[in-house]
Amino acid sequence: MRIDVVTIFPDYLAPLELSLIGRARRAGLLDVVVHDLREATTDRHRTVDDTPYGGGAGMVMKPEPWRRALDAVLAAGPADVGRPRLLVPSPGGRVLDQAMARELASEPWLVFACGRYEGIDERVLLDAAQRFEVTPVSLGDYVLNGGEVAVLAITEAVARLLPGVVGNAESLVEESHEDGLLEYPVYTKPASWRGLDVPEVLLSGDHAAIARWRHQQRLERTATRRPDLLAPTAADDPAGLAVVPATPADLPELYVLQLACWVHQAQLNPEVEIPALHETLDDLRASLADHPTWVVRSAGRLVASVRGHLDGTDWEVGRLMVAPDLRGRGLGRRLLAHAEAMAPPTATRFTLFTGARSEDNLRMYRRAGYRPTPEPCPFPGAVKLGKPVRR
């Protein structure tokens, strides 16, 4: 891999001579060339910045030195690899993650443009797009003084994935973020240190048990430190999710969830007129007045809901919905039980409606004790189910 870095502080990149990256360079696995942007200036002060149009604080890097510097990079680089990838460190860029590091590791030629001050004149990127594949990239939601620190981090994240750079390739597979989880805790000798002991399972020699322990540790560590990395299906135990009354603030998300869930039901039962697919947000808002509604959130996301309505002595359970990616994990059964538990004292029977072809729903309701009611269902293509209230 070839890496070119354009900067006004070439010495900032000196750490790339050290450790595994430095060894990879010496072994010919990685070719890193650092260019001084000031060498592309023409005035005796070697000026690379000027005041911003429109006013404002700070200075902006001038376009012409950048054009000349990038032209020089192209002229000096390999001629047989096509358009290089131009990475522009910027807090407004695509956030670097492990997937992006793997993506960049497959590129034969990367070029970094290190901005300073208030950034690089936007026209530089527009002009460069004719000759480079331009990608603004960010280390995260914070601001640095310049792009050099980002170049060091990105280069290490990418170069260590190149064949031969890391001695034990297996270690790359088990690291944090390789499969979306953080790495498990690691220990070495001694087995007991200052009153702190290595977990017994790691001393057992039972490799299957060790693998299970490590996987569980990864899940728990990720859930604690980076819950945003966990899909709800991987992290959430339905029994641990709170079922709470819906509020007006929940309605926009509830409306979206309702549409997502009942589209699937419409596909299964095309002949059924499904009210949930024809309601407006205002209709849903009005329903809160006489249909007590409960919702479930996971990591801030509204993932399930159910509501009830008293019709005479029938407690009608309705709008039982679970996000498509969470189906089959018991959340629907838990919501059904919650709705039943919230029935008023005057209710003597639970009732609900579902599509005649909704086999998964019918199976769940049968297991919960529901059976077809004596009275016919008023909705063509649907069935009415019920069971007595037992207190």
Image: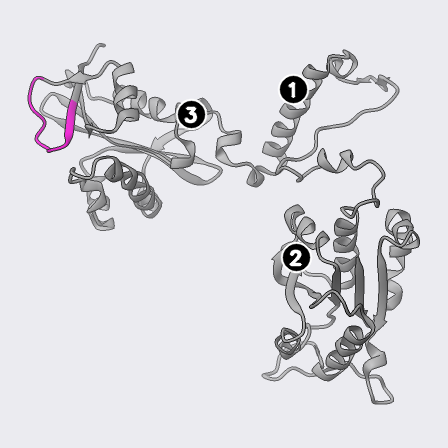
State which quarter of the image contains the C terminus.
Answer: top left
Q: Amino acid at mark 2?
A: Tyr
Q: Which mark is residue 212?
A: 1
Picture quadrant of residue 121: bottom right
Q: Amino acid at mark 3?
A: Arg
Residue under the point 89% across and 65% down: 11
Instruction: Say whether residue 92 is left or right of residue 161.
Output: left
Find the distance from the CA under tag 2 to the CA under tag 3.
Answer: 38 Å
Q: Is residue 219 above or below residue 90?
A: above
**Residue located beneath label 2 in the image:** 142
| In magenta stretch: residue 378 | yes
Q: Give the mark nearer the N terminus: 2 vs 3.
A: 2
Give the SS element for disc 3: loop
Out of 197 and 271, give the one closest to the viewer: 271
**Residue 308: horizontal and vertical position, in percent?**
22, 29
Q: Is residue 127 visible?
A: yes
In the image: residue 121, left or right of residue 296: right
Q: Is residue 283 above or below residue 379?
A: below
Q: Position of residue 76 (x, y in %)?
A: 83, 73
Q: How many C-alpha atoms fall within 10 Å of the one at disc 2: few (<14), some, or many (≥20)?
A: few
- The reply to whether discs 2 and 1 touch (Cβ–Cβ < 8 Å) is no
The residue drawn where x is 69% and y is 50% is 101
Image-quadrant location for residue 75: bottom right
Magenta residues span 374-384
Task: Classify residue 47 by image quadrant.
Answer: bottom right
